[in-house]
Image (tube, rainbow, N blue to C red):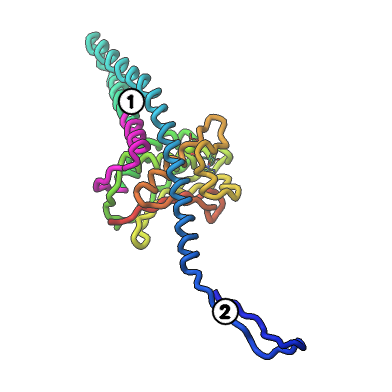
Amino acid sequence: MVFESPLVDASGRQIGWMGSILDITNAKRMEDRERRQGETLAHNARLTMLGEVASTLAHELNQPLTAIASYNAGIANSLAKLGVQDELVLGALQRLGQQAEHAGRIVARIREFLTRREPRHEHCDLHEVIVAAIELLKRDCQRRGVTLDVNLAPDVPAVLADAVLIEQVVINLVRNAADALLARESGRRIAVSSRVAGEFVRIDVCDNGPGLAGLRVEQLCAPFYSTKTDGMGMGLAICRSIVEAHQGVLDASEAPGGGALFSFSLPLT
Ligand SMILES: Nc1ncnc2c1ncn2[C@@H]1O[C@H](COP(=O)(O)OP(=O)(O)OP(=O)(O)O)[C@@H](O)[C@H]1O
Ligand SMILES: [Mg+2]
Protein backbone atom coordinates (compact mmCIF):
# COMPACT_ATOMS: atom_id res chain seq x y z
CA MET A 1 0.00 0.00 0.00
CA VAL A 2 1.43 3.41 -1.00
CA PHE A 3 0.80 6.68 0.87
CA GLU A 4 1.88 9.99 -0.53
CA SER A 5 1.44 13.59 0.54
CA PRO A 6 2.92 16.99 -0.46
CA LEU A 7 5.92 18.24 1.52
CA VAL A 8 5.48 21.92 2.44
CA ASP A 9 7.85 24.40 4.14
CA ALA A 10 6.99 26.76 7.01
CA SER A 11 5.42 29.27 4.59
CA GLY A 12 3.11 26.66 3.11
CA ARG A 13 4.99 26.39 -0.20
CA GLN A 14 5.19 22.89 -1.67
CA ILE A 15 8.80 21.88 -1.93
CA GLY A 16 8.35 18.23 -2.86
CA TRP A 17 6.53 15.00 -2.14
CA MET A 18 6.72 12.58 0.72
CA GLY A 19 5.89 8.93 0.20
CA SER A 20 5.76 5.77 2.26
CA ILE A 21 5.25 2.19 1.26
CA LEU A 22 3.62 -0.25 3.67
CA ASP A 23 3.81 -3.99 3.15
CA ILE A 24 0.32 -5.33 3.93
CA THR A 25 0.78 -8.78 2.39
CA ASN A 26 0.59 -10.46 5.79
CA ALA A 27 -2.44 -8.50 6.92
CA LYS A 28 -4.22 -9.40 3.67
CA ARG A 29 -3.27 -13.04 4.07
CA MET A 30 -4.65 -13.07 7.62
CA GLU A 31 -7.83 -11.38 6.44
CA ASP A 32 -8.26 -14.02 3.73
CA ARG A 33 -7.62 -16.83 6.17
CA GLU A 34 -10.14 -15.42 8.65
CA ARG A 35 -12.75 -15.08 5.91
CA ARG A 36 -12.18 -18.66 4.78
CA GLN A 37 -12.35 -19.95 8.37
CA GLY A 38 -15.61 -18.03 8.84
CA GLU A 39 -17.08 -19.59 5.70
CA THR A 40 -16.00 -23.09 6.77
CA LEU A 41 -17.55 -22.57 10.21
CA ALA A 42 -20.83 -21.39 8.70
CA HIS A 43 -20.81 -24.33 6.30
CA ASN A 44 -20.13 -26.82 9.11
CA ALA A 45 -22.84 -25.31 11.30
CA ARG A 46 -25.28 -25.67 8.42
CA LEU A 47 -24.29 -29.29 7.89
CA THR A 48 -24.52 -30.15 11.60
CA MET A 49 -28.04 -28.79 11.76
CA LEU A 50 -29.03 -30.57 8.54
CA GLY A 51 -27.50 -33.77 9.92
CA GLU A 52 -29.64 -33.57 13.04
CA VAL A 53 -32.80 -32.84 11.09
CA ALA A 54 -32.04 -35.67 8.67
CA SER A 55 -31.42 -38.16 11.50
CA THR A 56 -34.71 -37.28 13.15
CA LEU A 57 -36.55 -37.46 9.84
CA ALA A 58 -34.95 -40.79 8.91
CA HIS A 59 -35.96 -42.19 12.28
CA GLU A 60 -39.56 -40.96 11.92
CA LEU A 61 -39.90 -42.08 8.31
CA ASN A 62 -38.41 -45.54 8.62
CA GLN A 63 -41.29 -46.91 10.63
CA PRO A 64 -44.10 -45.91 8.24
CA LEU A 65 -41.97 -46.95 5.25
CA THR A 66 -41.38 -50.40 6.70
CA ALA A 67 -45.11 -50.65 7.46
CA ILE A 68 -46.00 -49.71 3.86
CA ALA A 69 -43.60 -52.36 2.52
CA SER A 70 -44.98 -55.12 4.75
CA TYR A 71 -48.66 -54.24 4.14
CA ASN A 72 -47.82 -54.26 0.45
CA ALA A 73 -46.21 -57.70 0.66
CA GLY A 74 -49.18 -58.94 2.73
CA ILE A 75 -51.73 -57.77 0.16
CA ALA A 76 -49.72 -59.27 -2.71
CA ASN A 77 -49.64 -62.63 -0.85
CA SER A 78 -53.36 -62.57 -0.14
CA LEU A 79 -54.18 -61.73 -3.77
CA ALA A 80 -51.94 -64.56 -4.96
CA LYS A 81 -53.78 -66.97 -2.62
CA LEU A 82 -57.11 -65.75 -3.95
CA GLY A 83 -55.87 -66.37 -7.50
CA VAL A 84 -56.26 -62.73 -8.54
CA GLN A 85 -54.51 -62.12 -11.86
CA ASP A 86 -55.45 -58.52 -12.58
CA GLU A 87 -52.32 -57.14 -14.30
CA LEU A 88 -53.17 -53.55 -13.39
CA VAL A 89 -53.57 -54.24 -9.67
CA LEU A 90 -50.58 -56.58 -9.43
CA GLY A 91 -48.37 -54.21 -11.43
CA ALA A 92 -49.39 -51.26 -9.26
CA LEU A 93 -48.67 -53.25 -6.10
CA GLN A 94 -45.26 -54.21 -7.40
CA ARG A 95 -44.41 -50.57 -8.18
CA LEU A 96 -45.71 -49.54 -4.76
CA GLY A 97 -43.28 -51.96 -3.15
CA GLN A 98 -40.40 -50.74 -5.33
CA GLN A 99 -41.13 -47.09 -4.53
CA ALA A 100 -41.34 -47.79 -0.78
CA GLU A 101 -37.93 -49.46 -1.00
CA HIS A 102 -36.57 -46.57 -3.08
CA ALA A 103 -37.85 -44.05 -0.51
CA GLY A 104 -36.14 -46.05 2.23
CA ARG A 105 -32.84 -45.96 0.31
CA ILE A 106 -33.11 -42.18 -0.26
CA VAL A 107 -33.76 -41.51 3.42
CA ALA A 108 -30.88 -43.77 4.44
CA ARG A 109 -28.46 -42.22 1.94
CA ILE A 110 -29.29 -38.61 2.79
CA ARG A 111 -28.97 -39.39 6.46
CA GLU A 112 -25.67 -41.18 5.86
CA PHE A 113 -24.40 -38.23 3.83
CA LEU A 114 -25.51 -35.52 6.26
CA THR A 115 -24.13 -37.27 9.32
CA ARG A 116 -20.98 -38.64 7.71
CA ARG A 117 -20.69 -35.80 5.16
CA GLU A 118 -19.02 -38.01 2.60
CA PRO A 119 -20.86 -38.82 -0.60
CA ARG A 120 -19.91 -41.98 -2.45
CA HIS A 121 -17.67 -41.34 -5.40
CA GLU A 122 -18.66 -43.80 -8.08
CA HIS A 123 -18.62 -43.54 -11.86
CA CYS A 124 -21.90 -41.92 -12.55
CA ASP A 125 -23.61 -41.30 -15.87
CA LEU A 126 -25.31 -37.95 -15.20
CA HIS A 127 -27.69 -38.35 -18.09
CA GLU A 128 -28.95 -41.65 -16.71
CA VAL A 129 -29.49 -39.91 -13.38
CA ILE A 130 -31.39 -37.02 -14.99
CA VAL A 131 -33.55 -39.34 -17.09
CA ALA A 132 -34.40 -41.42 -14.00
CA ALA A 133 -35.35 -38.28 -12.07
CA ILE A 134 -37.50 -36.96 -14.94
CA GLU A 135 -39.19 -40.36 -15.23
CA LEU A 136 -40.31 -40.08 -11.60
CA LEU A 137 -41.62 -36.52 -12.07
CA LYS A 138 -43.16 -36.87 -15.53
CA ARG A 139 -46.63 -37.84 -14.45
CA ASP A 140 -46.83 -35.17 -11.78
CA CYS A 141 -45.76 -32.52 -14.30
CA GLN A 142 -48.33 -33.73 -16.84
CA ARG A 143 -51.06 -33.47 -14.21
CA ARG A 144 -50.07 -29.88 -13.46
CA GLY A 145 -49.97 -28.93 -17.13
CA VAL A 146 -46.20 -28.44 -17.09
CA THR A 147 -44.22 -29.15 -20.27
CA LEU A 148 -40.82 -30.67 -19.49
CA ASP A 149 -38.10 -30.06 -22.09
CA VAL A 150 -34.95 -32.13 -21.66
CA ASN A 151 -31.93 -31.16 -23.70
CA LEU A 152 -28.82 -33.17 -22.83
CA ALA A 153 -25.48 -32.53 -24.51
CA PRO A 154 -24.21 -35.68 -26.22
CA ASP A 155 -20.58 -35.31 -25.11
CA VAL A 156 -20.88 -35.29 -21.31
CA PRO A 157 -18.41 -37.76 -19.79
CA ALA A 158 -19.14 -39.77 -16.62
CA VAL A 159 -18.33 -38.03 -13.33
CA LEU A 160 -17.33 -39.43 -9.95
CA ALA A 161 -20.44 -38.84 -7.91
CA ASP A 162 -23.12 -40.34 -5.71
CA ALA A 163 -25.96 -41.11 -8.13
CA VAL A 164 -28.67 -41.44 -5.44
CA LEU A 165 -27.79 -38.01 -4.02
CA ILE A 166 -27.44 -36.26 -7.38
CA GLU A 167 -30.82 -37.68 -8.41
CA GLN A 168 -32.27 -36.00 -5.32
CA VAL A 169 -30.77 -32.66 -6.38
CA VAL A 170 -32.39 -32.89 -9.82
CA ILE A 171 -35.73 -33.98 -8.32
CA ASN A 172 -35.71 -31.12 -5.80
CA LEU A 173 -34.89 -28.48 -8.41
CA VAL A 174 -37.54 -29.70 -10.86
CA ARG A 175 -40.14 -29.99 -8.04
CA ASN A 176 -39.42 -26.46 -6.92
CA ALA A 177 -39.79 -25.23 -10.50
CA ALA A 178 -43.11 -27.08 -10.86
CA ASP A 179 -44.32 -25.55 -7.57
CA ALA A 180 -43.32 -22.05 -8.71
CA LEU A 181 -45.23 -22.57 -11.96
CA LEU A 182 -48.51 -22.92 -10.08
CA ALA A 183 -48.47 -19.11 -10.06
CA ARG A 184 -48.98 -19.21 -13.83
CA GLU A 185 -52.31 -19.79 -15.51
CA SER A 186 -50.95 -21.52 -18.62
CA GLY A 187 -47.85 -22.11 -20.74
CA ARG A 188 -45.98 -23.68 -17.82
CA ARG A 189 -42.53 -24.83 -18.94
CA ILE A 190 -39.46 -26.36 -17.34
CA ALA A 191 -36.27 -26.91 -19.32
CA VAL A 192 -33.55 -29.24 -18.05
CA SER A 193 -30.27 -29.12 -19.94
CA SER A 194 -26.66 -30.18 -19.56
CA ARG A 195 -23.38 -29.05 -21.05
CA VAL A 196 -19.68 -29.25 -20.46
CA ALA A 197 -18.26 -25.92 -19.28
CA GLY A 198 -14.48 -25.99 -18.90
CA GLU A 199 -13.55 -28.47 -16.17
CA PHE A 200 -17.15 -28.85 -15.07
CA VAL A 201 -20.38 -30.35 -16.29
CA ARG A 202 -23.26 -27.99 -15.71
CA ILE A 203 -26.94 -28.88 -15.30
CA ASP A 204 -29.53 -26.12 -15.70
CA VAL A 205 -33.14 -26.26 -14.51
CA CYS A 206 -34.98 -23.29 -15.93
CA ASP A 207 -38.65 -22.35 -15.52
CA ASN A 208 -40.92 -19.56 -16.69
CA GLY A 209 -42.52 -19.00 -13.27
CA PRO A 210 -42.49 -15.81 -11.19
CA GLY A 211 -38.69 -15.77 -10.67
CA LEU A 212 -36.69 -15.18 -7.50
CA ALA A 213 -37.86 -11.70 -6.44
CA GLY A 214 -34.25 -10.53 -6.22
CA LEU A 215 -33.29 -13.19 -3.66
CA ARG A 216 -29.79 -14.59 -3.89
CA VAL A 217 -28.78 -18.23 -3.68
CA GLU A 218 -27.60 -17.93 -0.02
CA GLN A 219 -31.02 -16.71 1.08
CA LEU A 220 -32.91 -19.33 -0.93
CA CYS A 221 -30.70 -22.13 0.39
CA ALA A 222 -30.93 -21.11 4.06
CA PRO A 223 -32.35 -24.05 6.04
CA PHE A 224 -36.09 -23.63 6.72
CA TYR A 225 -36.52 -20.74 4.28
CA SER A 226 -39.80 -21.45 2.50
CA THR A 227 -42.64 -19.44 1.02
CA LYS A 228 -44.91 -22.50 0.74
CA THR A 229 -47.62 -23.34 3.25
CA ASP A 230 -46.53 -26.98 3.24
CA GLY A 231 -42.83 -26.39 2.56
CA MET A 232 -40.09 -27.33 5.01
CA GLY A 233 -37.48 -25.17 3.37
CA MET A 234 -34.95 -28.01 3.45
CA GLY A 235 -34.87 -28.92 -0.24
CA LEU A 236 -32.36 -26.35 -1.45
CA ALA A 237 -30.30 -26.49 1.74
CA ILE A 238 -29.78 -30.22 1.22
CA CYS A 239 -29.18 -29.77 -2.54
CA ARG A 240 -26.48 -27.22 -1.86
CA SER A 241 -24.75 -29.41 0.73
CA ILE A 242 -24.82 -32.38 -1.65
CA VAL A 243 -23.39 -30.37 -4.56
CA GLU A 244 -20.68 -28.77 -2.38
CA ALA A 245 -19.70 -32.17 -0.99
CA HIS A 246 -18.96 -33.11 -4.60
CA GLN A 247 -16.74 -30.00 -4.91
CA GLY A 248 -19.41 -28.49 -7.11
CA VAL A 249 -21.36 -25.24 -7.07
CA LEU A 250 -25.11 -24.61 -6.86
CA ASP A 251 -26.31 -21.30 -8.23
CA ALA A 252 -29.59 -19.47 -8.76
CA SER A 253 -30.41 -16.53 -10.99
CA GLU A 254 -33.26 -14.96 -12.89
CA ALA A 255 -33.90 -16.79 -16.16
CA PRO A 256 -33.37 -14.73 -19.34
CA GLY A 257 -37.09 -14.70 -20.25
CA GLY A 258 -38.33 -14.27 -16.65
CA GLY A 259 -38.64 -17.19 -14.23
CA ALA A 260 -35.85 -18.85 -12.29
CA LEU A 261 -32.69 -20.60 -13.39
CA PHE A 262 -31.14 -23.03 -10.93
CA SER A 263 -27.93 -24.71 -11.96
CA PHE A 264 -25.30 -26.94 -10.49
CA SER A 265 -21.84 -27.81 -11.72
CA LEU A 266 -19.84 -30.90 -10.89
CA PRO A 267 -16.13 -31.23 -11.58
CA LEU A 268 -15.05 -33.56 -14.36
CA THR A 269 -12.34 -35.89 -13.18
N1 LIG B 1 -37.88 -22.29 -9.25
C1 LIG B 1 -38.21 -21.43 -8.28
N2 LIG B 1 -38.88 -20.28 -8.57
C2 LIG B 1 -39.22 -19.43 -7.57
N3 LIG B 1 -38.93 -19.60 -6.27
C3 LIG B 1 -38.26 -20.71 -5.93
C4 LIG B 1 -37.87 -21.69 -6.90
N4 LIG B 1 -37.21 -22.68 -6.25
C5 LIG B 1 -37.21 -22.35 -4.95
N5 LIG B 1 -37.84 -21.19 -4.73
C6 LIG B 1 -38.03 -20.52 -3.43
O1 LIG B 1 -37.10 -21.02 -2.51
C7 LIG B 1 -37.76 -21.52 -1.34
C8 LIG B 1 -36.95 -22.61 -0.71
O2 LIG B 1 -36.95 -23.79 -1.52
P1 LIG B 1 -36.68 -25.19 -0.82
O3 LIG B 1 -36.70 -26.23 -1.87
O4 LIG B 1 -35.47 -25.09 0.03
O5 LIG B 1 -37.90 -25.35 0.18
P2 LIG B 1 -39.42 -25.65 -0.16
O6 LIG B 1 -39.56 -26.13 -1.57
O7 LIG B 1 -40.23 -24.46 0.24
O8 LIG B 1 -39.73 -26.84 0.86
P3 LIG B 1 -39.15 -28.36 0.78
O9 LIG B 1 -38.35 -28.52 2.03
O10 LIG B 1 -40.37 -29.19 0.75
O11 LIG B 1 -38.31 -28.46 -0.46
C9 LIG B 1 -39.14 -21.91 -1.84
O12 LIG B 1 -40.09 -21.93 -0.81
C10 LIG B 1 -39.42 -20.81 -2.86
O13 LIG B 1 -39.88 -19.64 -2.23
MG1 LIG C 1 -38.26 -27.63 -2.38
Of the 4 image quadrants, the one containing the N terminus is bottom right
Give the percent coordinates (x, y) of residue 160: 27, 49
Q: Is residue 68 left or right of residue 82?
A: right
Q: Earlier in the sequence, mark 1 or mark 2?
A: 2
Relative image position of residue 249 (x, y in whole percent)? 41, 52
Residue at image point 52% right, 52% down:
253
Q: Which residues are magenta?
A: 104-126
Residue 18 vs 223, above or below: the answer is below
Q: Which mark is residue 126?
A: none
Q: Which residue is mark 2?
A: 20
Can residue 174 be seen at all in this image of the molecule?
A: no
Residue 80, picture quadrant: top left
Q: Which mark is residue 100?
A: 1
Residue 183 located left or right of residue 241: right
Q: Does the magenta run of residues contain 108?
A: yes
Residue at left offset 53%, top offset 29%: 230
Residue that protrudes farthest toward the front in the picture: 10
- Give the tally of numbered discs: 2
Does the magenta portion include 257? no
Say which of 97 and 49 sits in front: 49
> In this image, 63 relative to 269: left or right?
right
Looking at numbered disc 1 in the image, what kind of residue is underneath it? Answer: Ala
Q: Is residue 257 above or below residue 53?
A: below
